[in-house]
Image (tube, grey):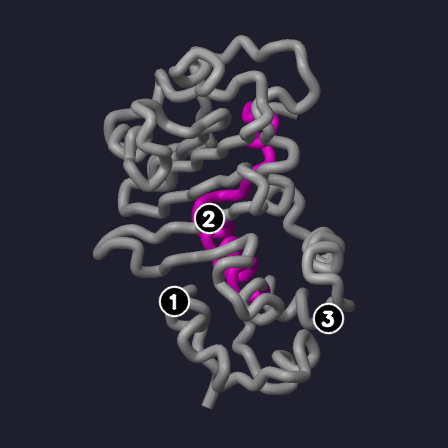
């Protein structure tokens, strides 16, 4: 699987944004220490932009900027043969065709290590006028999952509750209620009962700051 396959499996921007918010909300419930959360969402990254992110704690990550012009996706697999650290530059084609409207994200300090080139092995984008996700024209090396897309974006291409339940059970080493996961993935308002199903130690009030940070729909009153 490569970024070209990922482009065919990603949903439209609004659906992807909602899914990213739900993933971040689930992580906020299951992992109270922000430093150890795999999925995050910053609804106030800037005055006009939101940022979804994933970090596996082992050097692999992605970032998705949701902006008025559309969405920009950057992924980095530190063990990929396409790592920019191999030749001190991104692999040919990965970011060469990124349109001007997203170009500033390619070299954004937030997405690099101050080494003079962006940390990227996979890149996608979609403007609000596009009917599909776009990628560069790339000659991939002969390797399994050459750009890391298969494992980087697995929770974005398989958006089922069962997929997240499997990952969360492994990551957090606790049983994860499938019905509760479905509830959050559908962006239904949180309740104390729902929160307790995922972590009996928490109440809805404990999550107030996270609900605001993620931009999750507020609880019904």
Compared with 64, 77 (above or below) is above
- Residue 56 lies left or right of residue 122; in this view the side is right
Residue underneath mark 1: 213
| Residue at 42% over, 64% down | 214
Quote the CA–CA distance across marks 2 and 1. Answer: 13 Å
Expressed as whole percent of the image width and height from the top left, the position of residue 122 reads: 49, 27
Closer to the observer: label 3 or label 2? 2
On the picture, is 37 further left or further right than 211?
right
Q: Earlier in the sequence, mark 3 or mark 1?
A: 3
- The disc at residue 179 is 3
Q: Quarter of the image holding residue 81?
A: top right
- Disc 3 to disc 1, C-alpha distance: 24 Å
x and y percentages locating residue 93 in the rendered image: 43, 14
Q: Mark 1: which secondary structure?
A: helix
Q: Name the residue under label 2.
A: 53
Verify whether residue 209 appears in magenta: no
Dominant secondary structure of the residues highlighted in magenta in the image:
helix
- The region drawn magenta spans 3-26
């Amino acid at each position: 699987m490569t970024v070209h396959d990922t482009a065919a499996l990603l949903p439209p921007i609004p659906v992807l944004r909602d899914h990213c918010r739900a993933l971040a909300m689930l992580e906020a419930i299951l992992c109270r220490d922000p430093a150890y959360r795999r999925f995050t969402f910053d609804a106030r990254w800037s005055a006009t932009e939101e940022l979804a992110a994933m970090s596996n704690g082992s050097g692999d990550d992605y970032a998705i900027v949701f902006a008025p012009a559309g969405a920009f996706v950057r992924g980095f697999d530190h063990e990929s043969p396409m790592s920019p650290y191999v030749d001190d530059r991104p692999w040919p084609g990965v970011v060469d065709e990124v349109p001007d409207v997203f170009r500033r994200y390619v070299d954004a300090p937030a997405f690099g290590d101050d080494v003079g080139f962006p940390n990227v092995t996979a890149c996608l984008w979609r403007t609000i006028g596009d009917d599909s996700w776009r990628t560069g024209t790339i000659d991939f090396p002969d390797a399994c999952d050459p750009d890391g897309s298969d494992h980087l974006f697995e929770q974005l291409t398989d958006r089922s509750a069962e997929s997240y339940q499997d990952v969360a059970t492994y990551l957090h080493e606790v049983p994860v209620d499938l019905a509760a996961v479905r509830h959050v993935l559908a962006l239904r308002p949180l309740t104390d009962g729902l929160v307790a199903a995922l972590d009996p130690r928490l109440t809805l009030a404990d999550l107030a700051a996270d609900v605001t940070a993620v931009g999750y729909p507020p609880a019904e009153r």
